[in-house]
């Protein structure tokens, strides 16, 4: 059975690790003439709510959404060369939203980076990449943290 990757979902954030994943995902999509879905999850766990400073949940969410949209624009400018790019900026927990969007959009492949945490780091913080690998029903391409 031959794999046909027509829709490649690239999960990004504003880290160097996702830069590598995006570069790999865009190169693959370009070679296969696939449609790209750029996904930046507005991470609910990173919302900053500070009543003393007058920061409401809505304001914090707006700041995070703006950051997501700016990051997506930067990636498109850096790695373009693909005709079809769709953008996704759902709010939620990254590991769950990557799985949700991959199903809703009917992606054929998920591309994402990993922070390369140690075993103890994974125990303490969890691993988005590990969760996605375990719960995805489609192939997942993980770019290593030390990829050239």
Image (cartoon, grey):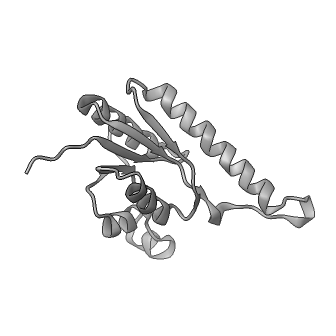
Position of residue 60 measured from the top left corner of the image (x, y, whole percent) = 76, 56
**Picture quadrant where residue 135 is located:** bottom left
* Residue at 72% over, 55% down: 61
Task: State whether residue 138 is above or below residue 120.
Answer: above
* Residue at 19% over, 44% down: 4
Is 148 or 34 nearer to us in this picture?
34
Residue 144 visible in the picture: no
Residue 129 visible in the picture: yes
Position of residue 122 measured from the top left corner of the image (x, y, whole percent) = 43, 70
* Residue at 46% over, 71% down: 126
Position of residue 105 measured from the top left corner of the image (x, y, whole percent) = 41, 51
Would you say 138 lies left or right of 92 here?
left
Instruction: Name the residue at the left extreme.
Output: 1
Q: How many marks?
A: 0
Task: State whether residue 33 is above or below residue 86.
Answer: above
Q: Quadrant of the C terminus?
A: top left
**Picture quadrant where residue 7 is located:** top left
Task: State whether residue 32 is above or below residue 89.
Answer: above
**Picture quadrant where residue 147 is located:** top left
Instruction: Name the residue at the bottom extreme.
Output: 123
* Residue at 38% over, 27% down: 82
Position of residue 97 measured from the top left corner of the image (x, y, whole percent) = 49, 61
């Amino acid at each position: 059975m031959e794999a046909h990757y027509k829709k490649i979902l690239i999960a990004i954030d504003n880290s160097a690790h996702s830069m590598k994943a995006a570069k790999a995902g865009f190169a693959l999509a370009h070679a296969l003439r696939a449609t790209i879905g750029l996904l930046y999850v507005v991470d609910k766990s990173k919302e900053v709510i500070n009543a003393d400073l007058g920061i409401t949940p809505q304001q914090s969410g707006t700041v995070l959404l703006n950051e997501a949209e700016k990051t997506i624009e930067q990636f498109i400018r850096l790695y373009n060369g693909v005709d079809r790019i769709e953008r996704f900026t759902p709010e939620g927990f990254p590991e769950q939203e990557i799985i949700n969007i991959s199903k809703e959009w009917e992606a054929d492949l998920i591309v994402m980076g990993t922070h390369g945490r140690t075993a103890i780091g994974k125990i303490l913080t969890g691993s988005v990449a590990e969760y996605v690998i375990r719960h995805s029903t489609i192939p997942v391409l993980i770019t290593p943290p030390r990829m050239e």
